[in-house]
Image (cartoon, rainbow, N blue to C red):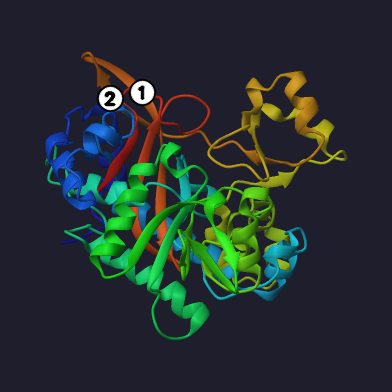
C-alpha cells in the first residue's frame, strides 16, 4: 500500500472528528466499581470513596492519534535528556532550596507531563512530581466498552500490567539509592491523607504493594518520627516513602521528621526535593523554552526541535512587568511554587488587583496554549469540555496515558461530565 496516498484518512483528523462527534458512553461503571473493590480488598470501597466524588471519572474517552502520542513521548525524552546536562543542572539548582542540592539517586516515581493539543501539535504546559491519578486511571482504562470505532488503548494496561510496572518502579528507586536488597516497608505519605481528594488512589497503591509482598501503610506526614537514625511510623521503621506532599522543599513544621530523614539519607524518598527542582520547578520552563540558552548548552538540534513544544515562558520580574501586562491577553500566569492549578490566572481575565500580587514576583508568564475540546452530552445537549493529556512516566519511560476533562481556567474535579478519561489511540 502506498502510505503517501492522499485518499487515505488522516489519523489526526479522525481523532479530532471523534472527539467532536462521538457521544457514546464507554465507561462501564459497575465493572469499574467491581475492579476497584477487588483491588482495594474492600467491598464498600466504591460507596465510601468513589460515589461521593461524583466528578472523578468522565463517562467518555478521549481519542488521540498514534502520531500525537508518539510525539509526546519524544518530547518527554527530550526534556529528560536535557535535564541530565551539567549546565542545565547548574542553572536550575541555582534557584533551588538547599535541601534540593544533594542527589540521593532516585529519579522520581510517577512523574506527570501535562500537554495541551495545540494547532501545531502537542504543547508541554507543565511537568509535575507526585502526579496524581495513575492507579485510578489504570483501572479506568480497563473498564471501557468499545464504541464508535474499533479502538485500542495506548500502552494497553492489561490486567496488572501497570501495577507490575509501578512495583518495579519503587524497587528501582530503592536500588538507585541503596544499591542492593529491597524495601520491606513503604509508607504512602501526605498531609491528612484521608481528607485528600485522591485518597482512594493511596488505598489502591497500598494494595498493589501488599499483594507483591511489601508491608505498606498510608501515613500522615505529621505522624512520622525520626529517631535513632530511622524514620518511623506507628512504632515501626519505614524504608521508603512514596511522597505525595506538595510542600516540595519539606519546609513546613509537620514535615520536619521527613525532611531530616531525607537530608541524612536515612530513608529513600520518591519523588523528592531534588527531583522536583530538576524537573518540576516551573521556573525551569523558562530555560527549556529558550532556544538561545539551549543552543549555548550544546543541546543537539533534534532535541531543540522537540523542545519547541514547551510554550515560551519567562519569569515575572519588576523589569518585564509592564511589558507582560500589555501582552497579558496572550499569557497564562502561574506561581513558581504552585500545584493543582491554584492561584493561576489567564491573562485576559487578570484584574489589576491580582496583577499587583503577580508582578511582585514568584510567578512565571507562559504563552497561552488554548486547550482542545471534547464534546459530551448532558441531558442530550452537546456541551464542550476542555481537555489536557497527562503522560505518567518513570525515568523517561511512559507507563500510562490519561486525559482530564474540565471547565474553567485549569483542570479540576468539579465539572459535570468531567474528570479523568481514558485515552483511546487511533
Q: Relative to residue 77, is residue 348 depicted above or below?
A: above
Q: Residue drawn 26% across and 29% down?
A: 51
* Residue 67 appearing in the image: no
Q: Residue drawn 49% across and 79% down?
A: 176
Residue 299 position in % (x across, y down): 63, 70
Q: Of helix, strand and loop, which one carries label 2?
A: strand
Q: Relative to residue 80, is residue 291 depicted above or below?
A: above
Could you tell me which quadrant the N terminus lies in? bottom left
Q: Nearer the viewer, residue 282 or 243?
A: 243
Residue 77 position in % (x across, y down): 48, 66
Q: Residue drawn 55% across and 36% down?
A: 341
Give left or right: position of 268 versus 382: right
Residue 93 position in % (x across, y down): 72, 64
Q: Residue drawn 45% across and 58% down?
A: 234
Q: Nearer the viewer, residue 148 or 204?
A: 204
Q: Nearer the viewer, residue 15 or 257?
A: 257
- Whichever of labels 2 and 1 marks the residue nearer the N terminus, that label is 2
Q: Of helix, strand and loop, which one carries label 1?
A: strand
Q: Label 2, on which residue? A: 376
Quadrant of residue 421 in the image? top left
Task: Count up the numbered dots.
Answer: 2
> Within 10 Å of the Cα at label 2, are there few (<14), some (14-19), or many (20+) other Cα atoms?
many
Instruction: Give the residue furthest to the right.
Output: 319
> Within 10 Å of the Cα at label 1, are there few (<14), some (14-19), or many (20+) other Cα atoms?
some
Q: Relative to residue 265, is residue 374 depicted above or below?
A: above
Q: Label 1, on which residue? A: 384
Measured Cα–Cα span from mark 2 to mark 1: 6 Å
Instruction: Give the residue furthest to the bottom.
Output: 180
Give left or right: position of 148 versus 324: left
Amino acid at each position: 500500500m502506498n502510505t503517501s496516498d492522499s485518499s487515505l484518512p488522516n489519523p489526526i483528523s479522525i481523532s479530532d472528528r471523534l472527539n467532536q462527534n462521538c457521544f457514546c458512553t464507554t465507561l462501564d461503571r459497575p465493572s469499574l466499581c467491581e475492579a476497584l473493590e477487588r483491588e482495594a480488598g474492600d467491598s464498600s470501597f466504591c460507596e465510601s470513596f468513589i460515589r461521593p466524588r461524583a466528578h472523578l471519572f468522565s463517562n467518555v474517552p478521549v481519542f488521540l492519534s498514534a502520531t500525537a502520542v508518539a510525539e509526546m513521548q519524544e518530547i518527554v525524552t527530550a526534556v529528560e535528556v536535557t535535564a541530565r546536562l551539567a549546565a542545565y543542572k547548574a542553572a536550575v539548582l541555582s534557584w533551588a532550596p538547599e535541601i534540593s542540592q544533594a542527589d540521593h539517586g532516585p529519579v522520581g516515581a510517577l512523574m506527570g507531563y501535562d500537554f495541551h493539543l495545540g494547532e501545531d501539535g502537542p504543547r508541554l504546559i507543565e511537568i509535575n512530581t507526585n502526579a496524581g491519578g495513575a492507579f485510578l486511571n489504570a483501572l479506568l482504562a480497563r473498564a471501557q466498552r468499545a464504541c464508535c470505532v474499533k479502538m485500542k488503548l495506548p500502552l494497553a494496561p492489561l490486567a496488572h500490567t501497570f501495577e507490575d510496572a509501578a512495583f518495579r518502579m519503587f524497587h528501582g528507586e530503592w536500588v538507585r539509592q541503596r544499591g542492593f536488597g529491597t524495601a520491606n516497608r513503604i509508607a504512602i505519605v501526605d498531609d491528612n491523607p484521608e481528607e485528600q481528594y485522591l485518597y482512594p488512589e493511596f488505598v489502591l497503591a497500598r494494595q498493589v504493594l501488599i499483594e507483591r509482598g511489601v508491608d505498606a501503610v498510608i501515613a500522615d506526614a505529621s505522624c512520622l518520627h525520626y529517631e535513632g537514625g530511622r524514620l518511623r511510623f506507628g512504632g515501626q521503621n519505614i524504608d521508603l516513602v512514596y511522597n505525595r506532599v506538595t510542600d516540595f522543599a519539606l519546609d513546613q513544621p509537620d514535615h520536619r521528621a521527613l525532611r531530616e530523614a531525607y537530608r541524612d539519607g536515612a530513608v529513600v524518598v520518591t519523588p523528592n526535593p531534588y527531583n522536583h527542582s530538576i524537573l518540576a520547578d516551573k521556573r525551569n520552563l523558562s530555560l527549556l523554552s529558550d532556544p538561545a540558552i539551549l543552543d549555548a548548552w550544546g543541546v543537539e538540534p533534534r532535541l531543540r526541535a522537540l523542545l519547541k513544544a514547551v510554550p515560551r515562558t519567562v519569569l515575572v520580574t519588576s523589569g518585564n512587568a509592564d511589558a507582560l501586562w500589555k501582552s497579558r491577553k496572550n499569557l497564562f500566569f502561574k506561581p513558581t511554587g504552585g500545584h493543582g492549578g491554584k492561584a493561576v490566572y489567564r491573562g485576559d481575565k487578570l484584574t489589576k488587583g491580582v496583577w499587583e500580587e503577580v508582578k511582585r514576583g514568584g510567578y512565571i508568564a507562559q504563552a497561552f496554549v488554548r486547550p482542545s475540546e471534547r464534546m459530551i452530552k448532558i441531558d442530550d445537549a452537546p456541551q464542550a469540555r476542555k481537555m489536557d493529556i497527562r503522560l505518567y512516566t518513570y525515568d523517561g519511560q511512559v507507563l500510562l496515558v490519561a486525559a482530564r476533562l474540565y471547565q474553567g481556567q485549569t483542570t479540576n474535579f468539579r465539572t459535570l461530565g468531567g474528570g479523568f478519561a481514558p485515552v483511546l489511540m487511533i
